[in-house]
Image (cartoon, helix red, strand yellow):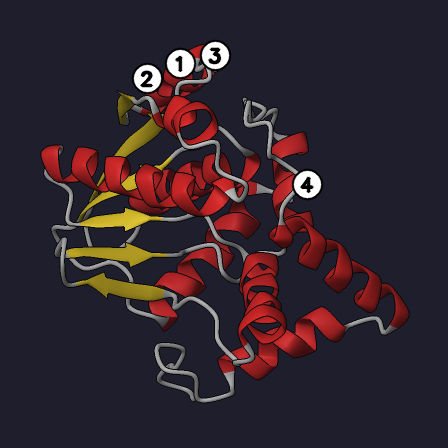
Amino acid sequence: MKLQQVLSLTRKAVDDYHMIEPGDRIAVGISGGKDSLTLLYALHGLQRFYPAAFELCAVTVDLGFGNLDLGRIEELCRTMDVEYHIVKTDIARIVFEDRCESNPCSLCAKMRKGALNDAMKEAGCNKVAYAHHKDDVVETMMMSLIYEGRFHTFRPVTYLDRTQITVIRPLIYMNEADVIGFVRKNDVPVVKSPCPADGHTKREYVKNLVRDINKEAPGVKERMFTAITGGKIEGWETDEH
């Protein structure tokens, strides 16, 4: 996928859900993975021509596994002239050694978001951009159905009262396959996750389930996404629906 196509899908999401307003300073949460780096490329490209002027900075929360090489990402941010912050933490030690969590993802995510929010507030940002794509939207809905018994997924835009931060998700119209194609075509400097739980989670199980269902009934993922966007779920309404 070409950058122009990424920008087109990103702008549509931003426009449909009014994600960006003039004067916003937006932090991009950079894990080092394909999704967050694609989001950085997308918002940096959008920044050049979007009618509402906004600022960007990038933030990586280093969980403390000790083997995270961010050199190429630092170089990318320098090339883009995007301010880059690396937040050192002991989250890995707390989750895997001190607490020995049997379900580490929940605590890790909570602590990681807390560290990210603190860093972006310190950097003067009022919004944070998460790199959730269309597959994430559908998989979260399926997880909610299977494990909670409700039809629910995260919103495109969420205002967090406690921190006074607005979360935006500009990649919601992109398929994961599109992200993979963009990363391969543009030699994006992806950093593999050092987390030992990576690929062994409930989300990974649901991801594989949705993939298998989509093989049996081609197009089902798109129909699920349409059910979400047109299903009168709070936060998913657009001017058209």
Mark 1–mark 4 Cα distance, whole angstroms, equals: 22 Å
CA neighbours of label 3 inside 10 A, class few (<14), some (14 to 19), many (20+): few
Per the rendering, the mark at residue 75 is 1
Tell whether 132 sits left or right of 143.
Answer: left
CA neighbours of label 1 inside 10 A, class few (<14), some (14 to 19), many (20+): few
Upstream in the sequence, badge 2 or badge 3?
A: 3
CA neighbours of label 4 inside 10 A, class few (<14), some (14 to 19), many (20+): few
Upstream in the sequence, badge 2 or badge 4?
A: 2
Mark 4–mark 3 Cα distance, whole angstroms, equals: 23 Å
Residue type highlighted by circle 2: Arg
Residue sitting at x 36%, y 62%: 14
For disc 2, the marked residue is 78
Residue type highlighted by circle 4: Gly
Pointer 2 with pointer 1, Cβ within 8 A: yes
Per the rendering, the mark at residue 181 is 4
Please tell me which residue lies in front, 185 or 167.
167
Secondary element at image label 2:
helix
Mark 1–mark 3 Cα distance, whole angstroms, equals: 12 Å
Q: Position of residue 63 (x, y in %)?
A: 39, 25
Front tag of 4 and 3: 3
Residue 150, relative to residue 91: is it above or below? Answer: below
Residue sitting at x 43%, y 43%: 42
Residue sitting at x 68%, y 41%: 181
Mark 2–mark 1 Cα distance, whole angstroms, equals: 5 Å
Q: Position of residue 80 (x, y in %)?
A: 34, 25
Front tag of 1 and 3: 3
**Where does the C terminus fall, quadrant-wise?**
bottom left
